[in-house]
Amino acid sequence: MAGFCAECGVPLESSTGSCPSCGIVAPPNKKNGWKIVVIVLAVVIGLGVLAVGGIGYVGWRAMHGLTAGKAANVSEAELGVSVYPGAVRVEKDSMRMKALGIETESASYTTSDPESLVLSFYKAKLGPNATSTERNGKTMLSLAENAGGAKGGERIIVKPSADDSGLIEITITHTVKTP
């Protein structure tokens, strides 16, 4: 069935050009392709606007949970491990961030002591469960607070200073997963 006659209401066959009952010629079927194109285009534009808004919101939330530099004011207690004795804090290299249920505090220090002493100090502080990785002149010590690091942990990077001052740089990062 193609429809009904607009004049008398008799059902029309799809191949019929006129009504068999009253003889009225049926108007040709109009193509509604442009309506489909407009609907699809509106849906695509609407989804694009929602995606851009969502990305903007996530970015805004991330930026409002971040403090860096001197304003971060990360304490030794928040780092989860003691600062190397006599190390001097590098104020511009501190960071505090809260995003997606994870809190991270980080601070950097320098010392004139040999790298081997600094590494020995932190290996003793982190204990036997700590892992040590060396790559490109940097040594990274890591300790997860529990199996798999599901709750967080500490990461300490020890490396020679990039400015050839002879100092050793120490960067301590403490991460905690919040409920």
Image (cartoon, grey):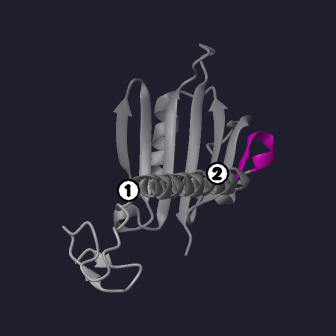
Magenta highlight on residue 34? no
- Residue lying farthest to the right in this orientation: 71
Is residue 60 positioned above or below 157 on the image? below
Task: Kindly indicate whether the residue at mark 2 contacts the one at mark 1 (C-beta within 8 angstroms).
Answer: no
In the depicted view, which residue is nearer to us: 113 or 151? 151
Q: Quadrant of the C terminus?
A: bottom right
Amino acid residing under circle 2: Gly
In the depicted view, which residue is nearer to us: 134 or 102? 102
Q: Please give the name of the residue rendered at 73% of the width and 54% of the height, measured from the top-left corner.
A: 64
Q: Please give the name of the residue rendered at 38% of the width and 53% of the height, measured from the top-left corner.
A: 130
Residue 56, disc: 2
The image position of residue 138, as x and y in percent, is 44, 29
| Classed neighbour count for the residue bearing mark 1: other residues with Cα under 10 Å, few (<14), some (14–19), many (≥20) | few
Kind of element beneath mark 2: helix
- Which of the two discs, 1 and 2, sits closer to the camera? 1
Q: Residue 18 falls in which quadrant of the image?
A: bottom left
Q: Look at mark 1 in the image and give the residue it sits on.
A: 31
Q: Left of 65 or right of it: where is 45?
A: left
Q: Left of 13 or right of it: where is 147?
A: right
Q: Residue 40 falls in which quadrant of the image?
A: bottom left
Q: For residue 79, say whether it is visible.
A: no
Q: For residue 146, say whether it is visible.
A: yes
Q: Please give the name of the residue rendered at 42% of the width and 24% of the height, measured from the top-left corner.
A: 137
Q: Quadrant of the N terminus?
A: bottom left
Is residue 169 positioned above or below 120 on the image? above
Amino acid residing under circle 1: Lys
Q: Please give the name of the residue rendered at 36% of the width and 56% of the height, measured from the top-left corner.
A: 128
What span is in magenta? 66-73
The image position of residue 105, as x and y in percent, is 63, 52
Is residue 157 positioned above or below 149 on the image? above
